[in-house]
Image (cartoon, rainbow, N blue to C red):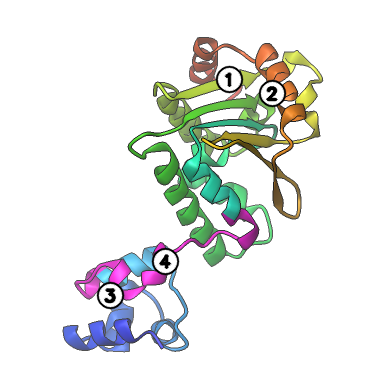
Amino acid sequence: MNQALKVAMADRGETIDSLAEQVGVDPKTVGRWITPGRVPHPRHRAAAASALGREVADIWPDVLKRREPAWLRPWVETELQATALRSFQVTVIPGLLQTPEYASAVLSSGLLGPDEVADYVETRMRRQKAVLERRKPPLFVAVIDEFALRRGDPEIMRAQLDHLVELAQRPNVLLHVLPLDAGFHAGQAGPFVIATTDDSDVAYLDDQAAGRLTNETAALWSIWDTLRSVALPRRQTIDFLEARSWLT
């Protein structure tokens, strides 16, 4: 039972029906929030907290906890310790550079339900802030295959490309597009990220089922150097993102 929600409702003189009306959901839904304590959609959490005059964290403290899958948590910890992150992506924009709308579209293409997608997007946005907006953010270098920039709804991609251009102005963010005319390249086997920490280099490799960490980074460094050599320089990349000639 969510005792904090029950107390907040009592203090405010709200019933299940009255709170449901303010939030715009069925009373049965609010009933499930109380017992067995199902966590609402982020939009509904915010509306309910506002109606009750409380902070979301006061009623649903667990939403501030990490909601990423267990296999990803070691990498999330590594991101927070990294002094530099070097990311290569073939088919999607790197997660730390995604807009909420783009992240939602990508996550919705899999097997996740709407509530799960919303939670994962919220978690991804918190990760971005924790990594890229901390007091001493890491150097973030990304090589993105042009193919990833061409996939997606045009309206979503326009906003995503604007976001990339904005991020690329930061001194610690270096973006490089790998153009299609580069042909076949060493990174076609899949995406990876290399994190440099005070102790060592750690790499993250993604696949269809889950990701994994490895300290065996020598081969990845060689691939990284090759990819950087055929990718567009920083200024040309920004010009390319601003031109976005493929969008109609």
> Left of 129 or right of it: where is 228?
right
Residue occupied by mark 4: 63
- Residue 34 location, quadrant: bottom left
Give the number of the mark in front: 2 or 3: 2
Category of crowding for the residue at label 4, using alpha-carbon neighbours closer than 10 angstroms: few (below 14), some (14–19), many (at least 20): some
Does dot 3 land on a helix, a strand or a loop? helix
Q: Tell me: residue 107, above or below residue 99.
A: below
In magenta, the rendered stretch is 50-73
Q: Earlier in the sequence, mark 2 or mark 4?
A: 4
Query: Of residues 203 and 26, which is closer to you in this image?
Result: 203
Q: Amino acid at mark 3?
A: Gln
Does dot 4 land on a helix, a strand or a loop? helix
Q: Amino acid at mark 1?
A: His
Distance between the alpha carbons at the discs numbered 4 and 1: 35 Å
Does dot 1 land on a helix, a strand or a loop? strand
Residue occupied by mark 2: 224
